[in-house]
Image (cartoon, helix red, strand yellow):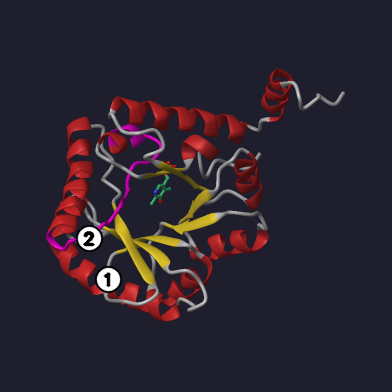
């Protein structure tokens, strides 16, 4: 029986009944983000939720889109590009967040809106050269190694200022901020220090170079609260929205 749309309660019940598991998960993650913003004394909406859809099919992205999600993160170029081509939904924003090799930059420059994982000048130069002039500038975050010897990916904090200056000089890119993936740890103080390092680095760069880098991409399913407490503006969440990856089919 069709529910009259004019009745708000009936509309709500209908929405709840139609909600997919991904829709439920998204609601729960949004509630976590809001609670963390409140706990940190930050305004509601200060943190954007990026849904990391790597390894999940286009149908999962569609479910999330129907539940209101618009920004999606992908780690693997081939998989991401195939999904982007398959999905014809309005207002999607695609973020590339995985390791990026030089021979894959062309496809990333042509298909994505953001790249979070630029960690050396050569990659930025290729993205700038390959970004079509008729597209909006590619939005860029520099990935920083905040974990020292515990991690290999990302530019060393001491290298970031030079990289920022060089990337700022490139056409067709808009530098937005910094990204990090701390080493896995259960130690809350270590985690806080890693996220705090990224925030301080961004704040120092803004002050010394008179920039307005507005983005801190940090925090995932298990540590988004700690990241939001330290000023994250984008949290990248996969498992808590889509479920465990690499589980056997069926
Ligand atoms: C997979 C991935 C995520 C999401 O991790 P979850 O623990 O599933 O939330 C976030 N950022 C990057 C760079 C990733 O590769």
Q: What is the magenta range?
A: 208-226
Q: Name the image quarter holding residue 124.
A: bottom left
Q: Is residue 98 above or below residue 102?
A: above
At which x and y percent is residue 187? Answer: 21, 32
Q: Residue at x 48, y 35 (%)?
A: 240
Q: Residues within 10 Å of mark 1 (few under 14, many from 20)?
A: some
Q: CA distance from mark 2 to mark 1?
A: 10 Å
Q: Name the image quarter holding residue 142.
A: bottom left
Q: Is residue 212 magenta?
A: yes
At which x and y percent is residue 236? Answer: 41, 45
Q: Is residue 107 above or below residue 155?
A: below
Question: Which residue is the extreme one toward the top?
Answer: 9
Q: Is residue 42 magenta?
A: no
Verify CB contact (< 8 Å) between mark 2 and mark 1: yes
Question: Which residue is the extreme one toward the front?
Answer: 6
Q: Residue at x 34, y 29 (%)?
A: 36
At which x and y percent is residue 223? Answer: 33, 35
Is label 2 or label 1 in front? 2
Q: Is residue 243 visible?
A: no
């Amino acid at each position: 029986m069709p529910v009259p749309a004019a009745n708000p309660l009936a509309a709500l019940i209908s929405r709840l009944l139609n909600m997919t598991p991904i829709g439920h998960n998204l609601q729960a993650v949004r509630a976590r983000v809001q609670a963390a913003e409140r706990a940190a004394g930050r305004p509601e909406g200060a943190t954007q939720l990026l849904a990391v859809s790597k390894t999940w099919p286009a149908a999962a992205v569609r479910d999330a889109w129907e539940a209101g999600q618009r920004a999606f993160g992908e780690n693997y170029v081939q998989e991401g590009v195939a999904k982007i081509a398959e999905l014809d939904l309005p207002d999607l924003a695609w973020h590339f967040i995985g390791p990026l090799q030089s021979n894959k930059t062309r496809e990333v420059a042509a298909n994505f809106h953001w790249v979070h994982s630029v960690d050396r000048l050569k990659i930025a130069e290729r993205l700038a050269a390959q970004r079509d002039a008729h597209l909006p500038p590619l939005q860029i975050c520099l990935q920083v190694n905040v974990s020292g010897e515990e991690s290999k990916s990302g530019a060393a904090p001491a290298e970031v200022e030079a990289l920022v200056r060089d990337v700022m000089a490139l056409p067709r890119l808009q530098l937005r901020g910094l990204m990090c993936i701390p080493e896995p740890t259960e130690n809350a103080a270590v985690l806080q220090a890693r996220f705090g390092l990224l925030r301080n680095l961004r704040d120092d760069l803004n002050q010394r170079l008179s920039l307005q880098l507005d983005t801190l991409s940090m925090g995932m399913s298990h540590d988004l609260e700690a990241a939001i407490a330290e000023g994250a503006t984008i949290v990248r969440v996969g498992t808590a929205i889509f479920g465990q990856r690499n589980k056997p089919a069926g």
